[in-house]
Image (spheres, rainbow, N blue to C red):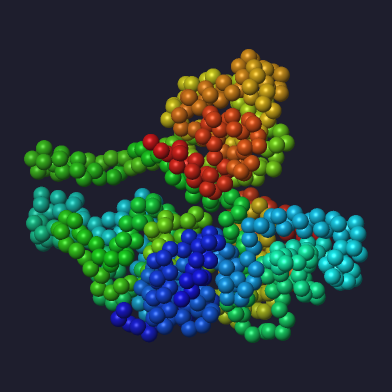
Amino acid sequence: MTDNGLKFSGANRYVLDDELASIVNISMALEMPLLLKGEPGTGKTMLAHAIAESLHMPLIVLNVKSSMKLVHALYQYDTLTRLNDSRFGDSRRDVSNIEEYITMGKIGQAFMAERRTVLLIDEIDKADTDFQDDMLDVLDQMTFDIMEIDKTVQARHRPVIIITSNAKKDLSDPFLGRCNFHHIAFPDPKMMRKIISVHFPGLEENLLEGAVTAFYGLRELDAVEKKPATRELINWIRALKADPDFTPKKLQKGDVPYLGILFKKSGDYQQALNFTSRRKLF
Amino acid sequence: MFIDFFYLLRRSGIPASPTAFLTLHKALAGGLILSLNDFYTASRAILVKSERYFDIFDQVFAHHFKGTDLTDTEDFDLDEAAQLLLEQWLKNPLELARSFGEDESTLNRLSADELIEYFKERLKEQKGTHHGGGKWIGTSGTSPVGHSGYHPGGMRVGGTSRSRSAIKVAMDRRYKDYSLEGPLTQAMIGEALKRLRNLVPSGPKDQVNMDETLYQTMKNAGEIEIVFEQSLRDRLKVILAIDNGGWSMDSYIPVVQTLFNYARAQFKELSTYFFHNSIYDNVWSDPTRYQKPQRVADFSRFDSETRFIVVGDASMAPYELMTADGSIHLEERSGKPSIEQLRFLAETFPRSVWLNPVPERMWGYTRTITMIAGIFPMFELSIDGLEKAVAHLSAK
């Protein structure tokens, strides 16, 4: 590890709890990928951004898609351009040199980078199990082969690897064996207030209080398919702030405007609406 | 170091691997862990790979480093016994209090829940210190209930207001919600059913088939000929048959609804049918089982590649399954016993499963469940069962 002593301790827009900070630091010191699970909106992806920002490392994001093959994340051999060049010969590339038609994928870029990078592998659960296992091999060895030119790419610096997963289901055992694991629980109201004040410095105390209370009240609703998360709350507060007619007193009275920002499924919206209008009567 | 802790974790059912344990030691040797708090976070991040085990981990951690009680498998018995004691207590408080060596008024102050906890505690003590004496109770007669250790609210140790120690954090059991016995959510079902995908080409031809392009270009004497093909899409056909009748299925409605909701969103070609108890001559496309009947015999014309999934508790009187006029609905009695219809369906659709919301350990107690399990491969309607079912359905 080239830059020992680097310690992650939070970033501008990210509120970090101590537990997570020490897990990140241990994973970095052990040079193991960190697998993060948790509800959507608990800041899994944001963590990678925050690490990159605070350690001043470039961030490389690999958004996993279901149809993805591992090789796409490593490198791509642009056969079509080569075919075109060989036919028309109007480019300055050397057609007989295959290497000129190899472009690096996200993992390849992280390996080839001049400095240590943060590699975020987002939503790994979307890909199939083979992808996951093969990828962990690559990340473990820090090398991969480019088959077309029989060349081995060796990572110059071992990137800081953050992997996120939304799935409630466990990933495969070999995969889990090679990374550290943390589950980010949904922030409690105290934490949430901190997060909000980071995003809205100088927010009125009673607006903050009212919004957070109402938010957690609405999260308690039964049978809601998609519970509102941090992202929704932040957008909601933004909307409340923008509305000149809105006063925090309204929230206390049970009048909750802009429910549509919090609840995005029509069934959920209806339910929340019933709940709040019922409360207004009392 | 910490070998006992490691084995205790494994004994408690956490699949911690030796490699992970060595990694933990690497962290210890590297001077990364300086306090018990660090050790708690580090050992959990390294050894425990799923939030489902966080709760057990917390308990084991608290037990190992603080000596709190582990909830053991005998808890069920204890629950029963404590319940009995409570009943006895209600009948004759004075006598029971005396047998515990407690003043009646001390116990009187406890709520019902607390009483149960108290009884359980004492019963446990009794188990531990039984040798030697015929005494029913332990030695300490005055310890009040409330510090029970595995009760989430039980850790109200007075006085300390320092920052939360790892043990206190562990004793909080924050991850109780994520334990294995959690309810089946749509996300879990989705995750399990995802593997059923059966990809076939469909849609616009917008992907370059490289091999074919090269071949055609060569054939064309080097004049480039690009060949496009369709991308792969999921075209799986699924029939879902749901038992929605009668009282016996009522308690499982939420979980079946979740399954149904997900299936509807996921599969393009999904037909849902409803039946009551078992399948006779007809199944219905409408949940009221009245307007749109579908003759079971007509299923033979369906694609046999279709996955046939039955959801039902398979619990009924044996004659409903076995006799020719078994249906409790008169108009359905056509002469073929239901079990024949089920066999017919299982033969028509070789890839079929029966998902049963009844816990697997109870299956042996119901005759019809065992009989139907002989026809359809039966799986429990839980995360694990669903995964097994999907594995069965997608097997070649």
Residue A213 in view of the camera: no
What residue is at 85 percent from the left and 65 percent from the top?
Answer: B99
What residue is at 77 percent from the left and 58 percent from the top?
Answer: B82
Q: In screen coordinates, is B228 left or right of A240?
A: left
Q: Position of residue B19 (x, y in %)?
A: 39, 66
Outermost top residue: B335
Q: In which image quadrant can residue B199 be found?
A: top left
Q: In screen coordinates, is B396 left or right of B89?
A: left
Q: Position of residue A78 (x, y in %)?
A: 20, 55
Q: In screen coordinates, is A67 left or right of B252?
A: left
Outermost front residue: B132
Q: Position of residue B274 (x, y in %)?
A: 62, 31
The vertical placement of B157 against A64, above or below, is: below
Q: In which image quadrant can residue A76 be found?
A: bottom left
Q: In which image quadrant can residue B66 be found?
A: bottom right
Residue B329 in view of the camera: yes
What residue is at 28 percent from the left and 40 percent from the top?
Answer: B229
Q: Nearer the viewer, residue A143 or B257?
A: A143
The vertical placement of B317 against A199, above or below, is: above
- Quadrant that contains the C terminus of chain A: bottom right
Q: Nearer the viewer, residue B99 or B346?
A: B99
The vertical placement of B315 against B99, above or below, is: above
Q: Position of residue B332 (x, y in %)?
A: 66, 19
What residue is at 35 percent from the left and 42 percent from the top?
Answer: B232
Q: Nearer the viewer, residue A253 or B180?
A: B180
- Quadrant that contains the N terminus of chain A: bottom left
Q: How many marks?
A: 0
